[in-house]
Amino acid sequence: MPSNQKPKKPIVDERPEPGERGARRTIILICAVLVISVVIFGIIQASRQPAAVVEPSTPVPTETSGALVVREDSRRLNDAPDATVTFVEFLDFECEACAAVFPAIEQLRQTYGDRVSFVIRYFPLPSHFNSERAARAVEAAAQQGELEAMYTKMYQTQTEWGEQQIPKDDLFRQYAQELGLDLEQWDAAYNSEATLQFIRNDFNDGVALGVTGTPTFFLNGELISPETLDDLTTMLDQALAE
């Protein structure tokens, strides 16, 4: 005879409530981001873009001149007047490894931006057709106070223009327009010999310092080679403690 007794409800309902599912999903995403950041730094050494014009045997000085690593007019991503630590990245906007490490650098800026000065030096590799153009586009924006906006734009759009043998001047001008820049001023700066020389001065400094690829990092004037994000965080913490 069939039983009319209702099935017993489990003592603990193991199905998460909607809010719990959202919280778990958020935790998983955060963990994934952290893991990706560590992996990114771990593969940089293998994926760094080499500078073809620099001999592989060029020695990297153990002690470098601070005036070469950071110049008075070098571009800074943040305003930290009381910073006692300076982090410098020689970069190439067409370099895939630079784009890969960009999110981790942004994470570091959020954590250390009030205590560490983050400096970029242009190091466009000759093997990258649009790299110097991209650097000119960023520098032209910097001259209107929009360094960070165009710097970010270049990495976010790298797949649109990178690794191509077609000049992307018009596309970079479109980016300037999207950022609300004064196009007449931007055009003048983009095509200026002074802008080009500024970028080449950065590149020449890098060569003199033994930079052979991108990204290359310096901390308080010394070359560093972090293999993980934790390595770099530890280095920053130690420098701040000195």
Image (cartoon, rainbow, N blue to C red):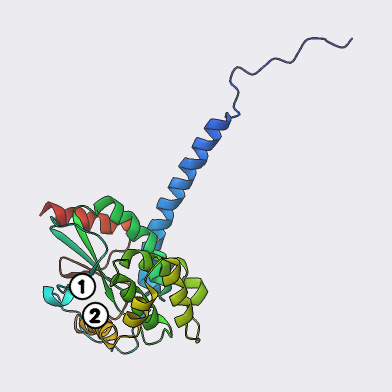
Going 48% across and 47% down the picture, which residue do you hit?
Answer: 29
Residue 209: horizontal and vertical position, in percent? Answer: 19, 80
State which quadrant residue 151 falls in. bottom left
Residue at 48% across, 44% down: 28
Is residue 57 toward the left or the right of residue 19 in the image?
Answer: left
Badge nearest the viewer, 1 or 2: 1
Residue 126: image quadrant is bottom left
The amino acid marked with disc number 2 is: Asp
Q: Residue furthest right?
A: 1
- Image spot of residue 89 (x, y percent): 27, 69
Q: Are marks 1 and 2 in contact (CB under 8 Å)?
A: yes
Q: Which residue is mark 2?
A: 202
Q: Which of these two is toward me, 11 or 155?
A: 155
- Where residue 7 sits: x, y (%)? 74, 16
Residue depicted at x 39% and y 82%: 133
Residue 108 location (% of width, % of height): 30, 55
Quadrant housing the N terminus: top right
- Residue 65 appears in the rendering: no
Q: Choose between 99 and 27: the one closer to the eye.
A: 99
As helix, strand or loop, the secondary structure at mark 1 comes to: loop
Q: Which mark is residue 74?
A: 1
Task: Give the amino acid at mark 1.
Answer: Ser
Counting residues from the start of the chain, the first of labels 1 and 2 encountered is: 1
Instruction: Decide: is 53 above or below 218.
Output: below
Q: How many marks?
A: 2
- Vertical position of residue 7 compared to residue 215: above or below: above
